[in-house]
Amino acid sequence: MSVKLNPDKEIVETVKKGLRRTGGYCPCRIQRTEDFKCVCREFREQIADPDFEGFCHCMLYYKSKD
């Protein structure tokens, strides 16, 4: 298993700007709770799932099963 940044540099830069603007909270979400602090709870749970492969909600990270 590995977690890597999205290979699309434009998406990475856009999301990182949003994270700076929101103080580290997912810029794709309205609520500012600990569940949405990057790396969000949803993606942490997906990382723990051995069958999950894919992007986090805001497409910043990608988890592969390799």
Image (tube, rainbow, N blue to C red):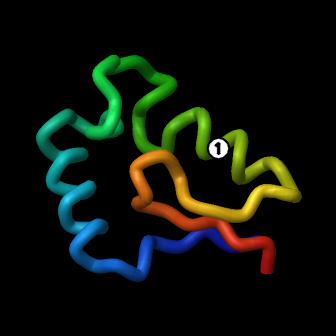
**Disc 1 crowd, CA 10 A, few/some/many (<14, 14-19, 20+):** few
Q: Residue at x 71, y 47 (%)?
A: 46
Give the mark count.
Answer: 1
Q: Residue at x 70, y 72 (%)?
A: 64
Q: Residue at x 26, y 55 (%)?
A: 15
- The outermost residue toward the right is 50
Q: Is residue 11 left or right of residue 46?
A: left
Q: Amino acid at mark 1?
A: Arg
Give the quarter of the image for residue 2.
bottom right
Instruction: Find residue 41 and report its horizontal and vertical position in percent.
Output: 58, 33
Say which element carries label 1: helix
Quarter containing the N terminus: bottom right
Q: Residue at x 61, y 68 (%)?
A: 3
Residue ID for mark 1: 44
Instruction: Find residue 38 and report its horizontal and vertical position in percent.
Output: 42, 42
Say if 46 sits above or below 4 in the image. Answer: above
Say if 11 sits above or below 33 in the image. Answer: below
Instruction: Find residue 60 and report its horizontal and vertical position in percent.
Output: 41, 60
Instruction: Find residue 39 and report its horizontal and vertical position in percent.
Output: 49, 45
Give the quarter of the image for residue 54.
bottom right
Say if 53 sits above or below 26 in the image. Answer: below
Query: Depth check: 25 or 54 in front?
Result: 54
Quarter containing the C terminus: bottom right
